[in-house]
Image (tube, coloured by chain):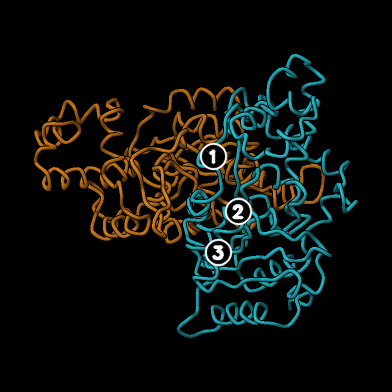
Chain colours: A cyan, B orange
Amino acid sequence: MLDSWNEGAAKSAILEFVRSVTTPGETFVPPAERIATFDNDGTLWCEKPNYVQADFLLRRLNQMADDDPSRRTRQPWKALYERDHTWLAGLMTHVADLTTGVTEAFEGITTEAFEVKVRAFFDATTHPTLGVPYTQLAYHPMVELLDLLRANDFHVYICTGGGRDFIRVVSEEMYGVARDHVIGSASTLEYRDGDIYRTKGLEMPIDDGAGKPVHIWKRTGRKPLFACGNANGDTEMLEIAVFSVLIDHDDAEREFAYRDGAEKVMLNAQMRDWIIVSMKDDFARVF
Amino acid sequence: MLDSWNEGAAKSAILEFVRSVTTPGETFVPPAERIATFDNDGTLWCEKPNYVQADFLLRRLNQMADDDPSRRTRQPWKALYERDHTWLAGLMTHVADLTTGVTEAFEGITTEAFEVKVRAFFDATTHPTLGVPYTQLAYHPMVELLDLLRANDFHVYICTGGGRDFIRVVSEEMYGVARDHVIGSASTLEYRDGDIYRTKGLEMPIDDGAGKPVHIWKRTGRKPLFACGNANGDTEMLEIAVFSVLIDHDDAEREFAYRDGAEKVMLNAQMRDWIIVSMKDDFARVF
């Protein structure tokens, strides 16, 4: 079990928790209540140098500007066309412009047509520095952890701030997580003429921060027994779980070393004695 | 199989469809894609003379007026207090007032505190004319159908216009449907101070009409293979399913006979050759 994990406090604590809730006695939890929720970006797969979905989106935005050059006078297409590195470096701060881009990028197509586009992206694209398809960039020790939990009758869900209908396309092959076990942010949808169409808008709240516990309840009718994340947006999900695990990106050699965007969650982990997993020390291999 | 169903066209068609999608060959459907969705009120349990949830809500509204008599000057509390039968008879037309009542009735409490209230209601309340607890008013032939589908590796979901978090409390014991397989309308929720609270508002779209296919996609990432309903609000769900079944309430003796609120769905069923189940002829027993 957890063969790709080094012996240490993190591995021991996880195995002991799983044992405690599956062994008859005071700490036993019935299988129906064994809900495990995992963030995706930076928790199950690599999120650097960019979110995978940002790559998908930027390619689509470039294509939209090719199709209709008048877009190049408006953000976010303008910055992309002019290779405005200052604007792009602060990408995540341009929320309103980005939302415009995201919601217009795939507006008016059916959910199934969207899936075809996502599939084509994953089939054609490799990671910019690691040089392999994104679908090969799941963290192997985390896939083992998902397997361990399922073998112990946990219901394993992805709970991603990214797009639910984006991740569903690859969740089964990458993580063994069926599409009905993917929770995430989503565009608004509409039924008309016998099919389901994406419309221009984001479902609120998005599946980040305080939105995560709400989404988990909506989907499962329960709070998580086990939760795992790596970023500030996972704080609330980890707060509400019984057993909480934080992935620390401290391995510059095998992956990327960074704690920006994890300041708040790290502080909480230290104050509340959550399990902190060092990718450098606790993972015998990464991918 | 389906022992409480009389032999006839409806039973034969259902058994033949299940056989066709589970037997290797051209019509085979992989288990992961075998999504079955069932309306609840009037499809799985009795919805007359009132929706069960209306009974739950009216009791709460009366209690709210007892707690704060000033409410009796406002609808819907006013009509209840004055026993305004004209207003109450047109209950479902007073949407705005009712929404006020619904959303204020359980505002600001946690999802778990709400569940305690629902449980207490089901434990204490009996059907006004049939005289047994609501939890005994599942249609037995339908419970058999759910069992048959699950035995054939279908993923069976409830998809109710009523409250998701209301039905979750009894779905397992009544139908064998786990709470993560209940899709429905819901109040808005908020995470704060380490818990999940109901807030004043309804999540839109509600799970009725065109909202049903959207909710089913959000939850499962698929369209239903098998769907079953009884009312106009089920039309779109039945339209988008591969195999569609309509329950016709034509049994005044053992249940209630009515087609009001089912005019549109009945017309569609006839035009599109959906399977129509006559409760009178096709059910050997009802409860």
Circles 3 and 1 on the same subunit: no
Mark 2 and mark 3 residues within 8 Å of each other at the beta carbon: no
Disc with the residue nearer the chain's start (2 vs 3): 3
Closer to us: B265 or B220: B220
Mark 3 and mark 1 residues within 8 Å of each other at the beta carbon: no
Q: Quadrant of residue A197?
A: top right
| Mark drawn on residue A35 | 3
Classify residue A175 as left or right of residue A235: right
Distance from label 1 to label 2 (Cα)? Answer: 18 Å
> Of helix, strand and loop, which one carries label 2?
strand
| Residue A267 % position (x, y) | 54, 65
Closer to us: B283 or B75: B75
How many numbered badges does the structure rendering display?
Answer: 3
Type of amino acid at the residue the image marks with label 3: Ile
Residue B151, placed above or below residue B187: below
Circles 1 and 2 on the same subunit: no
| Residue A64 % position (x, y) | 77, 23
Type of amino acid at the residue the image marks with label 2: Cys
What residue is disc 2 on? A159
| Mark drawn on residue B215 | 1
Residue A149, placed above or below residue A213: below
> Of helix, strand and loop, which one carries label 3?
strand
- Whether residue B161 appears in this view of the structure is yes
Q: Residue at x 13, y 42 (%)?
A: B65
- Whether residue B144 appears in this view of the structure is no
Chain label for disc 1: B
| Residue A94 % position (x, y) | 62, 34
Nearer mark to the viewer, of 3 and 1: 3
> Of helix, strand and loop, which one carries label 1?
helix
